[in-house]
Image (spheres, rainbow, N blue to C red):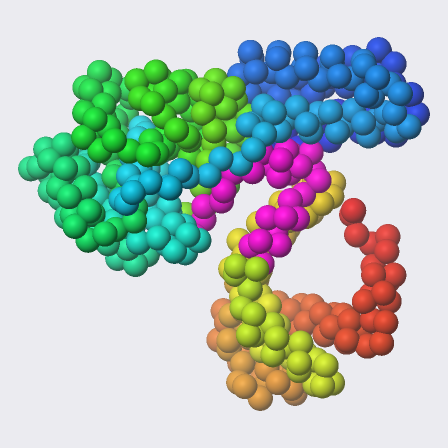
Amino acid sequence: MFENLTERLSRALQSVRGQARLTDDNIKDALREVRMALLEADVALPVVREFIEHVRERAIGQEVMTSMTPGQALIKVVRDELIVMMGEQSAGLELNVAPPAVILMAGLQGSGKTTTVGKLSRWLRERTKKSVLVASADVYRPAAIHQLEVLAGDIGVEFFPSSASDRPEDIATRALEYARLKFIDVLIVDTAGRLHIDAEMMDEIRRLHAVLHPVETLFVVDSMTGQDAVNTAAAFHQALPLTGVILTKIDGDARGGAALSLRHVTGKPIKFLGTGEKSAALEVFHPDRIASRILGMGDVLSLIEEAERKVDRDKAEKLAQKLKKGKGFDLQDFRDQLQQMRSMGGVHGLLDKLPGMSQLPQTARDQINDRQFVHMEAMINSMTLQERRFPDIIRGSRKRRIAAGAGVEVQDLNRMLKQFTQMQKMMKKMTSKGGMAKLMAGLKGKLPF
């Protein structure tokens, strides 16, 4: 997400980054480029105008002009204004009510609403340790009811049965009574979507709102629809007392204009981002972290939090102890590292959060893909335990057997073994005396940040 905007803004601000002194002319040129970058990212025109005006006011003031590094100060101003545009603070769910806390989900058909109900259920169960009941009031699309039932089973939350012959209000009433009877913490109700906004749809969701009295009414919107996402959010906001927005499919949205416009247009916070198809692919929306990502500064905090949640601590501890004892880093360990990387969103998920990665040429970014890591894992899986522990024995006929088993060429296996050897040397340096300092010195000048 934001790849195009990050690239354009980086170019626009590069011209002032090292300036010892800012003038009206170079500020004007930089802001013109920033304006074009935002418009190309499909940010709403009124939002762009207000943003540029706020940046200009601060840029020509004491804050920037008297700074020792005015170019850096201007970049800070741009970051601060991006944060303000997106809502300043992360807005959590308001669940401090007598259970069940009801969450009503609204949105157009195809926005990923039902899938998001599943993701949110998993997030609540894993992060807040809440018991969750999900119910579908989408009586126009029986497949939606079945889809939610399957998702609930996969995630491990309870599903309240409903059918296409039921009235949506009756489903909501019965689900609420059941949640109270079973002392369930959170009830999430999925509603019917339409291909477009119509009066009948709005009347129905208003009736559901009156029956359920939800603490959260969340609008689910597809980020890839750009300005249409903002327009539909504004229409729903007029019809319903929305409490927040969930922006889906951001992994496929290189522009990111919807994320920058929604808060300004609706006045409601973006609460979550849908970052992929899997049930775990839901992120809390942090305006400050997103602003840093947009400006190519990375998002190390999110990376650390993700590592704390998803890295297998037992495996990490065992590997650390093994290396301390002087035992070598083998292919089994290498496979574990590949699996850990995949669990954290893959290589692109990591790159987006690392500072300076926006400086990598697009050709280099395109060459880095998760498919390579899947192939590498398949090659290791084709090996015997002895081969994983003692890679030096992998020669001739063993190579041909392993490559055939993984469905790759022998050259691919040779490349993987070479990469493994480099990783092995790196691990050895890290565990030697003063190893980390030596390693960083060796990497100096080779990293893009």
Q: Residue furthest front?
A: 98
Write the residue at 62% across / 21% down: 38
Residue 176 versus residue 410 in the image, above or below: above
Where is residue 344 shown, x and y percent of the image? 54, 56
Write the residue at 26% across / 57% down: 153
Where is residue 40 shown, x and y percent of the image? 60, 21
Say which quadrant the N terminus sits in: top right
Q: Nearer the viewer, residue 295 or 93?
A: 93
* Magenta region, residue range: 280-307
Can residue 326 be seen in the rendering of this structure? yes
Q: Is residue 135 left or right of residue 112?
A: left
Residue 244 versus residue 352 in the image, above or below: above
Write the residue at 68% across / 11% down: 53
Residue 115 painted magenta: no
Q: Quadrant of residue 107?
A: top left
Q: Quadrant of residue 196?
A: top left
Residue 300 painted magenta: yes
Can residue 154 be seen in the rendering of this structure? no
Q: Residue furthest left?
A: 165
Where is residue 446 shown, x and y percent of the image? 82, 54
Q: Quadrant of residue 87?
A: top right
